[in-house]
Amino acid sequence: MAKRLIPSFNRVLIEKIVPPTKTNTGILLPESTTKLQSGKVVAVGPGARDRDGKLIPVGVKEGETVLLPDFGGTEVKLGDKEYHLYRDEDILGTLHD
């Protein structure tokens, strides 16, 4: 059993963040507020190579929170947790506080 997955090439392993469905006081939130697709970067591949063989590094780092497209990615299950693999160019951006 693999303890850690290191993605190949320009792929990024992401753990999706599940938004809350209700507030701390118990008020149920409408479905439209839970629409934002975001995740935490768990692992990053070394990058892709261009035509000359030079390494193009991945644009995100481990631990960053990223914005994801509604569709895409490959589901991966490691142990009890589910992750998603995305290509670097599929990630829409990083989220900062």
Image (spheres, grey):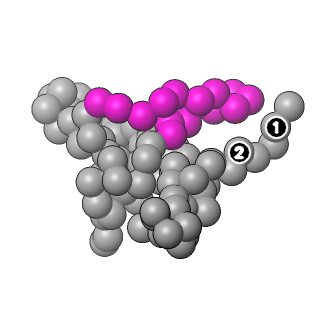
Residues in magenta, as a range: 71-85
Mark 2 packing: few (<14 Cα in 10 Å), some, or many (20+)? few
Q: Using the image as rendered, state which of residue 32 and residue 24 is in the foreground.
A: 32
Q: Using the image as rendered, state which of residue 48 and residue 59 is in the foreground.
A: 48
Residue 97: x and y in percent read 31, 71
**Residue picked out by circle 1:** 2
Judged left or right of residue 40, residue 33 is: left
Q: Main secondary structure of the magenta part?
A: strand
In the rendered structure, which amino acid carries the disc numbered 1?
A: Ala
Q: Gap in Å between the C-alphas at discs 1 and 2?
A: 7 Å
Residue 68: x and y in percent read 31, 45
Residue 64 visible in the current orientation: no
Residues at marks 1 and 2 touching, judged by CB atoms closer than 8 Å? yes
**Residue picked out by circle 2:** 5
**18, above or below 41, in the image:** above
Q: How many marks?
A: 2
Residue 35: x and y in percent read 21, 36
Residue 26: x and y in percent read 30, 33
Instruction: Look at the numbered disc 2 and give the secondary structure of its residue.
Output: loop
Residue 84 magenta-highlighted: yes
Q: Quadrant of the N terminus?
A: top right
Instruction: Look at the numbered disc 1 and give the secondary structure of its residue.
Output: loop
Query: Which quadrant would residue 2 be assigned to in this image?
Result: top right
